Image: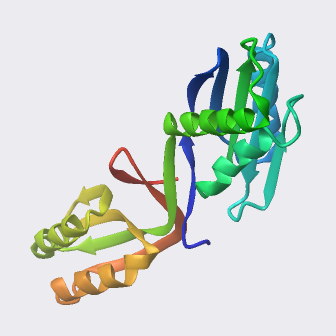
């Protein structure tokens, strides 16, 4: 697993106007080239009457796949600026299509580069972008005397508790980043005098969404 990487969790739509030309940016998360191509085709159908539907996407945890298209605009003035916005933000597994409705005034190559880049940024601003970090589910089993201490320790670190089951003992399941996993386990062990039983689940990616850590 990578230490962490940035991606789009929830897509969005942004728009700018430059000399009466409309630039509409649509952003979605994608996990394969097939998904990206399907999204691009859907945008071409939606904006069938537009002059250009330019796009870029980056796929892979390390951004192994990069593609872009100027769709009839002068070479290097549309797809590449969109791609550079994604790459500049360090975002992968995402696709952006910027649709242009021509307003009657030529923008020149510099104007096009700026407009397509600005539209892509506007689309990202309207999207939910997250940092995915390596983490794990941590199962904690304790007696009732250790519960308060564990809840305090988890609360101090802002750790999300997925579930708590109360029987003759208490079983909790928390989401912990791999980075702080060792420290959390040590604190719980010390705080409960070694009475709590801890079990790590399979590694997974976590991200803070709407202020709460979730598995993504």
Whether residue 11 is visible here, answered yes or no, is: no
Count of marks placed on residues: 0
Residue 19 versus residue 93 in the image, above or below: above
Asked if 124 appears above or below 150 in the picture, the reply is above
209 over 180 or under it: above or below:
above
Of residue 180 and residue 18, the one placed in the foreground of this image is 18
> Which colour scheme appears in the figure?
rainbow
Q: Quadrant of residue 200?
A: bottom left
Residue 131 horizontal side relative to residue 114, left or right: left
**Spot occupied by residue 148 in the image (x, y as percentages of width and height):** 11, 69
Pick the residue in front: 212 or 162.
212
Q: Position of residue 12 (x, y in %)?
A: 55, 31
Residue 162 or residue 25, whichever sits in front: 25
Could you tell whether 127 is left or right of 42 in the image? Answer: left
For the point 79% across and 39% down, the residue is: 77
Instruction: Determine the image quadrant of residue 15.
Output: top right
Q: Residue at x 14, y 75 (%)?
A: 146
Which residue is at a point 75% across and 31% down the rendered structure image?
39
Image quarter of the N terminus: bottom right
Q: Is residue 158 visible?
A: yes
Q: Is residue 31 left or right of residue 127?
A: right
Which residue sits at x=64%, y=29%? Answer: 25
Q: Position of residue 76 (x, y in %)?
A: 83, 43
Q: In the rendering, at what x and y percent does residue 58 appear? A: 73, 51
* Left or right side of 161 for 82: right
């Amino acid at each position: 697993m990578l230490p962490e990487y940035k991606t789009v969790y929830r897509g969005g739509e942004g728009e700018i106007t430059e000399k009466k030309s409309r630039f509409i940016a649509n952003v979605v998360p994608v996990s394969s080239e097939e998904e990206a191509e399907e999204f691009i085709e859907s945008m071409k159908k939606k904006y069938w009457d537009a002059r250009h539907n330019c796009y870029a996407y980056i796929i892979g945890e390390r951004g192994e796949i990069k593609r872009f298209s100027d769709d009839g605009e002068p070479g290097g003035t549309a797809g590449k600026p969109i791609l550079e916005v994604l790459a500049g933000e360090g975002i992968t597994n995402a696709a952006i299509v910027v649709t242009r409705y021509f307003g009657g005034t030529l923008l020149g190559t510099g104007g096009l580069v700026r407009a397509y880049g600005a539209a892509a940024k506007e689309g990202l601003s309207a999207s939910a972008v997250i940092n995915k970090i390596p983490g794990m589910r941590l199962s904690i089993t304790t007696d009732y005397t250790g519960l308060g201490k564990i809840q305090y320790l988890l609360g101090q670190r802002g750790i999300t508790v997925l579930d708590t089951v109360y029987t003759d003992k208490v079983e909790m399941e928390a989401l912990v980043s791999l980075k702080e996993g060792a420290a959390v386990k040590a604190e719980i062990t010390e705080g409960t005098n070694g009475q709590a039983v801890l079990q790590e689940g399979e590694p997974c990616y976590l991200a803070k969404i709407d202020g709460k850590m979730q598995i993504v």
